[in-house]
Image (spheres, rainbow, N blue to C red):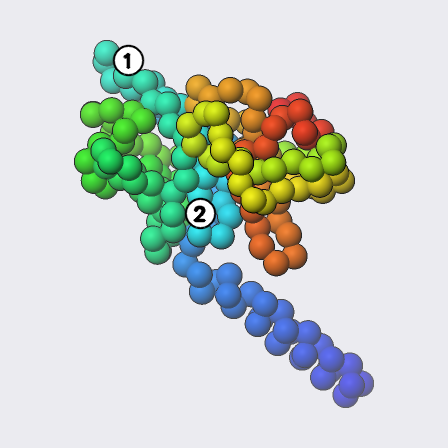
Amino acid sequence: MRKCSVLLLLIAVSAAATDAPAAADDRGFDPSGVWMGQHGPLALMRAGDTLSFSYSAVFGATTHICDGIGIAGFVGDGRWEYRDDQGAVTFTTKNGRVTMQVTDGIASFCGAGWPGETFTPDSWKPAYRCRVNVAKAHFLVVGPLPPEPRPGYVVRGDWVEAIGLVNESSPAWLLARYVGKERTTAGLLERDALECQEGL
């Protein structure tokens, strides 16, 4: 009986040690999936210190359009910043909600006057599981098309999580994430390289 109690104690301590880094990284919750807001949809995929996004929206009385795709970097306290030469947009992933707001200049992919966006849990749809069906598929940079290749890749039989792009990018690519034993990689993958469990 004593050996059993000691074993259970060791398992509990080990589990607590495993959970500690995740609780201490301050990244908020994992928002990967598609969110529907008042102005339009937002697709997100988190991997390490990066949050890849695809965003489309219509706002304002004169029908302004947002068409955004890129990568935001982690800046602390559940916040992720996308910055370019026109300004910065901050994504917040805390308390089950996602917010987007301009924190400097303007949102280049929306233009002046964009009011930001808040997404609630009831608007969220998770990513689909997809299996790689080609010998090798390289991840591509999340950004303006055509995308550039990255060193990371997946091979036939690997499983990834994937979601469709919601901005005006080509439907030939999906926003995807591969969770490996040592690291997680996110980027664009060719749609034809994947067989998905749901219709993407």
Q: How many marks?
A: 2
Q: Is residue 35 above or below residue 77?
A: above
**Residue at (47, 35) in percent of width and height:** 142
- The answer to whether any part of residue 120 appears in the image is no
Q: Nearer the viewer, residue 29 or 146?
A: 146
Quadrant where the C terminus sits is top right
Q: Which residue is mark 1?
A: 63
**Residue at (50, 40) in percent of width and height:** 45
Question: Whole-percent x and y of residue 93?
Answer: 40, 46
| Mark 1 residue type | Thr
**Badge 1 vs badge 2, beta-carbon distance below 8 Å:** no
Crowding around mark 2 (Cα neighbors within 10 Å: few <14, some 14 to 19, many 20+) is: some
**Residue at (34, 53) in percent of width and height:** 75
Q: Which residue is mark 2?
A: 50
| Mark 2 residue type | Thr
Quadrant where the N terminus sits is bottom right
Outermost bottom residue = 2
Q: Is residue 6 above or below residue 196?
A: below
**Residue at (51, 48) in percent of width and height:** 47
Crowding around mark 1 (Cα neighbors within 10 Å: few <14, some 14 to 19, many 20+) is: few
Q: Secondary structure at mark 2?
A: strand
